[in-house]
Amino acid sequence: MVDEGYYFSTSGIFKLGKVLKERQTKKNRQEWCWDVGEVIEPQVDDIVTQIKKRHAQIQKAKDKAKKRDKSTCLITNQKKNAVDNWKLAAHHLYSQNECPHLADSEDNLITVKEEVHDQFHSEY
């Protein structure tokens, strides 16, 4: 977890909750501090799982876009074949950073040669 340049591990938060529990005088606050330490790990695990699922959904959309475009670069109109040694990339029309809700939408992707994709991102 990150907060303004500080990094907190789940074990660190667990230890912090334990120390805070020992220093609290009211029982309800002791329990709350202990609960924070107890629930942090499954919460972080859930967040990590959601991120991994999201990456898988985005990759699936990219694969579908390449198949939809018949493994053809829509900029150069070159079709991927066994002889040529170049790769295809799926390019987001609307940036996945600016529009994350569109990142896994096949309609937001076009297929381009990886070289074209890299050139685009180096310039823009």
Image (cartoon, grey):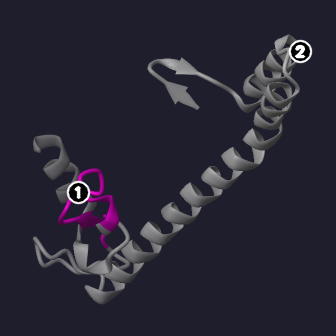
Residue 5 - label:
none
Q: Is residue 31 above or below residue 57?
A: above
**Mark 2 element type:** helix
- Percent from the top left, x then y, of residue 33? 79, 28
In the rendered image, which quarter contains the N terminus? top right
- Percent from the top left, x then y, of residue 78? 17, 77
Of 44 and 118, nearer the camera is 44
> Splitting the image into 4 quarters, where does residue 22 fall?
top right
> Splitting the image into 4 quarters, where does residue 51 fall?
bottom right
Amino acid at dot 2: Glu
Residue 95 - label:
1
**Mark 1 element type:** loop
- Residue shown at 24% from the left, 64% from the top: 92
Visible residue check, residue 20: yes
Does residue 85 show up magenta in the picture?
Answer: yes
- Percent from the top left, x then y, of residue 67? 35, 86
Of 39 and 90, nearer the camera is 39
Residues rendered magenta in the picture:
84-101
Visible residue check, residue 85: no
Viewed as shown, does residue 43 lie left or right of 92?
right
- Residue shown at 76% from the left, 49% from the top: 42
Magenta highlight: main SS = loop
Q: Which residue is mark 2?
A: 22
Of 53 and 79, nearer the camera is 53
Q: How many marks?
A: 2
Q: Is residue 37 above or below residue 49?
A: above
Amino acid at dot 1: Ser
- Residue shown at 64% from the left, 24% from the top: 8
Q: CA distance from mark 2 to mark 1?
A: 48 Å
